[in-house]
Image: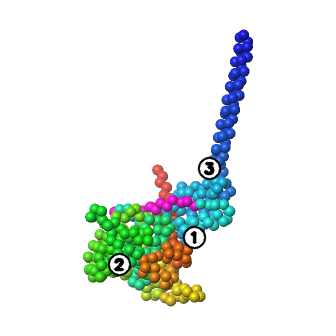
Amino acid sequence: MAQWYKIYHHLSLLFLLFFAYRQIKVVILFSKFFSSSDPRNSEPTENEVIVESTLAQYHSEAFPKGVINCCQHLTIKESKKDIVVKGEIGFPCQTELDELSHQLTKAINKQVVIDLTLLVMPIKKHDIADVKNIIAVASGKGGVGKSTTAVNLAVALQAEGARVGILDADIYGPSIPLMLGVKNEKPMSEDGKSMIPVNGLGVEAMSIGFLVPDSDAAVWRGPMASRAFDQLLNETRWSELDYLIVDMPPGTGDIQLTLSQKVPVCGAVIVTTPQDIALADANKGIAMFDKVNVPILGLIENMSYHICDNCGHQSFLFGEQGGVDAAKAHNVPLLGQLPLSLAVRENADQGLSQVIENSTGQIAQQYLKIARNLAGQLFLTKDKRSPDTPDILIKEV
């Protein structure tokens, strides 16, 4: 009996061992299956390597050192369906990323999605709540299309993925309400102390034109205008803006200098035409910002040429390459050259924007390119995450 019990015991033990072996084998098989489905646990695929190499070698005006050098926490993951690029980027450039994604999709013959989270960091410390970076748009003289450029630039930055506001600093001749199509709007106040900005074309806006009639704004004295602007700047409740565009009054007089000193600007953009007299005044504008230690992010040449509606011929009505020469002389980037366009003027009068009305058109693409170049220039020259920022190594001795 004891012998049969021993045999039974050994058979039971063998059965349990066999069952346990089968269970372990199943677990091993499942673990291998799940681990192999995650490409991060294996070597990069051929397509992942191609995408990474392309992003590193791709160069443009917005990406002079490649896309990868402007990104943080970048991952590239291929699945059966597509290849997804994720990470963070420090300036708005969504339309260029979309085009790059399209070109990669065609080259690899598989869907490539570039999904980068925009994370704009403040460049300069200031006390204006919920505004990261303030950019001044200025001109040495009137009539060069500064306000029209400022509005379309703000809309273009918004189209590239940023949260944007525009502040009309032209106390004497405010035009932003008309150009945004919100001329008859009034800012609201919930506490009687601060104002909620008006929204036009997707952009938050504040202007003296919302508060007083046009005829009254033109007769204010300098100190009165300066105090009014100070209130507009500091008593507006902006809603977490990446960029606040300040449309400066034309000229380089006392009011312009005072505003330049009061506003915590991280950079300025100069708008000019190719005409010699406009370029002379643009040089004065650059000199003014140099005196108050505001860096020039670039120069925009407006009304560079006229395109014939019938034949497409370009005519240089106000001279040629003047903005290019001025940018070279001052060692600042030429952010872009915009044509003299009837459509832009008509849109401005009607409170519309070419960036929205004809987003695939040549002029809209020019504004988008300028917006990317401007934001990219600010990132590359001022942001500590920029590839141009030197690494500082501190050693204990």
Query: What colouring does the structure picture have?
Result: rainbow
Depicted 121 relative to depicted 22: above or below: below
- Asked if residue 120 lies in the magenta stretch, the reply is yes
Disc 2 marks a residue whose amino acid type is Pro
Q: Which residue is mark 2?
A: 174
Q: Secondary structure at mark 1?
A: loop
Alpha carbon of mark 3 to alpha carbon of mark 1: how far? 30 Å
Kind of element beneath mark 2: loop
Foreground disc of the pair 3, 1 = 3
Q: Position of residue 202 (x, y in %)?
A: 44, 69
In the picture as drawn, the residue positioned furthest to the front comes out as 184
Q: Is residue 266 visible?
A: no
CB atoms of marks 2 and 1 within 8 Å: no
Q: Secondary structure at mark 3?
A: helix
Residue appearing at x 68%, y 62% in the figure? 109
- Residue at the far top in the pictured view: 1
Residue 358's place in the image compared with 303, above or below, is: above
Q: Mark 1 = which residue?
A: 60
Q: Is residue 33 left or right of residue 344?
A: right
Distance between the alpha carbons at the discs numbered 2 and 1: 36 Å
Q: Is residue 115 above or below residue 165?
A: above
x and y percent of residue 204 in the render?
Answer: 39, 68
Left or right: 396 in relation to 360: left
Q: CA distance from mark 3 to mark 2?
A: 56 Å
Front-most of 274 and 144?
144
Q: Residues within 10 Å of mark 1 (few under 14, many from 20)?
A: few
Range of magenta residues: 114-127
Q: Which residue is mark 3?
A: 40
Residue 242 appears in the rendering:
yes
Q: Quadrant location of residue 22?
A: top right
Residue 285 part of the magenta-drawn span: no
